[in-house]
Amino acid sequence: MSFFDLIRRRRSVRTFAECPLKPDDARQILEYSASVHNPYAIPIVWKLLDAKEYGLNSPVILGSDLYIAGKMSRVPHAEEAFGYAFEMIVLFAESLGVGTTWIAGTMNRSAFEKVLELSEGEVMPCVSPLGYPAKKMSLRESMMRKGIKADSRFRFEDLFFAGSFETPLSEAAAGNLRDALEAVRLAPSAVNKQPWRILVDQDSVHFYKYCNRGFISDAGWDIQKIDMGIALCHFELVASESGVAVSHVIKTDAPPAPEGMQYIASYSTKSNA
Ligand SMILES: Cc1cc2nc3c(=O)[nH]c(=O)nc-3n(C[C@H](O)[C@H](O)[C@H](O)COP(=O)(O)O)c2cc1C
């Protein structure tokens, strides 16, 4: 199955079948996690955690007792790096039929952080349950999905622009970047805010964050930059599948961000076609 197919198929799973993860699936996920890179080359340590053993829980998750969590140094671009790498793991789990949900808020965080033995200067951005999706969602899960409109996304033209932020980019005009941009559009984000805005400009694709209120901690930690890392991941994976060679770069001369937006990173594009 292609990455684009996995991205189209994935959804957050909060109700799990009451059967434990097969040891072989757990092993594969942990091995894959250890091999995942990110464009910022920031190391991340991944662990599988037994919820019963350590008293871990998330009030939104039913039926899974296994979590994956990662810890890293709190350095510049940690959020984007984590978003990129964790999404690679989420998509790998999806390829095995294992369900996940990104969780940054709804968990007993201090218990998770204690098991991970976070030291000074380290952060555990998010965790995810791992398990097989139940045949039917719990009422709580379907109510939650409705509440945050989890099944809807902004339109292509609301998110992507050609040459300047004055000119929306249509699917039809996106050419060989169409699937890669669609993969960004479908990405998961905190509270489904979809903060990514993209400017396609000659041989560059510039990523900006639309800054919603309430996502940056007093210490400057920005959850929406994790969303941006997920967007970078989807774009890079599906651009490559579409035969477009892309390379990640942080530009000093990217077009200035409009008010309320922040420049994050760019991809240089060069069509192989
Ligand atoms: C960085 C991040 C943090 C998230 N935190 C939570 C969370 O704390 N609790 C939760 O239930 N879902 C959380 N989500 C899942 C989003 O609500 C979900 O991805 C979004 O509503 C879209 O739904 P979908 O994943 O089913 O496509 C988070 C997602 C991301 C990307």
Image (cartoon, rainbow, N blue to C red):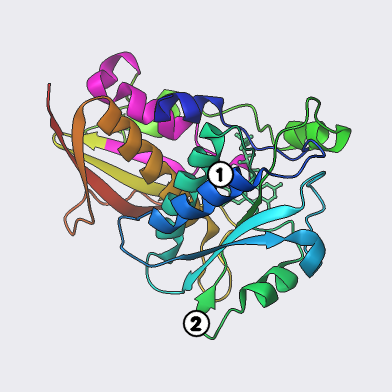
Q: Which mark is residue 189?
A: 1
Q: Is residue 67 left or right of residue 187?
A: right
55 lies above or below 183: below
* Figure quadrant, ligand 1: top right
Q: Quadrant of residue 94?
A: top right
**Which quarter shows the C terminus?**
top left
Front in this rendered view, residue 202 or 235: 235
Q: Which one is in front in this view, the residue at disc 1 or the one at disc 2?
A: 2
Magenta region includes residue 262 = no
- Name the N-terminal-most of marks 1 and 2: 2
Could you give the CA–CA distance between mark 1 and mark 2, rounded to whole angstroms? 25 Å
Give the amino acid at mark 2.
Gly
Q: Residue furthest right?
A: 139
Query: Residue 227: x percent and y percent?
Result: 49, 49
Q: Which residues are magenta?
A: 171-199
In the shown orientation, is residue 144 left or right of residue 164?
A: right
For the residue labelled by badge 1, is the local secondary structure a helix, a strand or a loop?
loop
Residue 239 higher or lower than 69, as above or below: above
Question: Nearest the camera: 155 or 21?
Answer: 21
